[in-house]
Amino acid sequence: MIRSGGLVAFPTETVYGLGANGLDAEACAKIYETKGRPSDNPLILHVADYAMAKQAAAEITPMAERVLAAFAPGPVTVILPKRDEVPSKVTGGLATVGIRMPDNDVARALIRAAGTPIAAPSANRSGRPSPTTAAAVFADMDGKIPLILDGGPCRFGVESTIVDCTGERAEILRPGAVTREMLAEVLGELAPPLVFREDEAPRAPGMKYVHYAPLAPLTLIDAPRGKIGAAFRAAVREATAEGKCPGVIVSKETAEEIESLVPPEHIAVTGSAGDLSAMAANLYEALRSFDDKAATVLFAETVEEAGLGVAVMNRLKKAAGGRIRFYN
């Protein structure tokens, strides 16, 4: 299917991807059409090994070599100058391309069998939470693609870290499971955290547009650790008084504090407080879990923006459209 210009959803260690031949402009155009994805939002090329990366990149910079040696196969994407063979449809018209080597045996076997880099954003309708199971792909893509390759649940649950390796210092364009601290150990000083303006052309996926949004509007609840339960109780009571039906996405500990106020089916638990790996792995499924429920507003617990928490909060803020309610 990949060789003949078709689309295939496949698993990676981060989320499920919607794949097409990354050197076939017409096939890649189908990705944008199927997802409803804006045409200036670049795609990432997934490769099976270092040799295939050279099919897509005009140069693998010394900085990128260090990143790949330390973290590939794994949840990291490097931005490099593209070869002429890579269609502008893949790169959103940019002279650079994102390349990553997934740490998933099924994904790499598919790429090797296809014999080409596979362009693949997340296998969901544009703007929706990314799928971390084949069932979640089916919910968005039923009738739109011929095949979903089921590899079970994804391990990390948030998309790869994207690192621009074309400048003097590495620049993180999208946070992920490979954290800033991990990259700094390998590369030394990194460029300052990116401040992206909405009038700029995105240099990588996930930089622009609303992403990861559930069907019901989401607001983040930010409160000191000892006051999170009280903050959620206040938010839930206020929403209920306004005639709304609230749902919550919280840690196990917060869930125990509000269980008398919210029906069990309207509580999505992402893991124990402070377990960022569990929160990342469960986040998108928690957001999607309310799609077929009666909740009309959603509230989600924030985490500290350090380490993996940077990636979790990046996804939560985009899912909420920036709506955050602060409690002291």
Image (cartoon, rainbow, N blue to C red):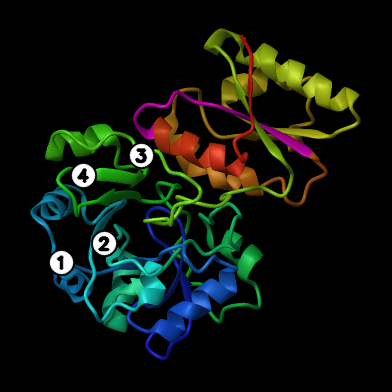
- The residue depicted at 37 percent of the width and 54 percent of the height is 13
Which amino acid does the dot numbered 2 rest on? Met
The residue tagged 2 is 101
Q: Which mark is residue 194?
A: 3
Q: Earlier in the sequence, mark 1 or mark 3?
A: 1
Could you say which is closer to the camera, residue 63 or residue 271? 63
Q: Answer above or below: position of 39 versus 78.
A: below
For the residues marked 1 and 2, what is the alpha-carbon distance in whole angstroms?
8 Å
Q: Which mark is residue 50?
A: 1
- The residue depicted at 38 percent of the width and 72 percent of the height is 90
The segment highlighted magenta reads: 297-308
> Which of the two discs, 4 and 1, sits closer to the camera?
4
The quadrant of the picture occupied by the N terminus is: bottom left
For the residues marked 4 and 1, what is the alpha-carbon distance in whole angstroms?
20 Å
Q: Answer above or below: position of 208 versus 110.
A: above
Which amino acid does the dot numbered 4 rest on? Ala
- The residue depicted at 8 percent of the width and 54 percent of the height is 62
Which amino acid does the dot numbered 1 rest on? Tyr
The residue tagged 4 is 170
Secondary structure found at label 1: helix
Mark 1 neighbour class, 10 Å CA radius: few under 14, some 14 to 19, many 20 or more: some
Residue 1 visible in image: no
Residues marked 1 and 3 touching at CB (< 8 Å): no
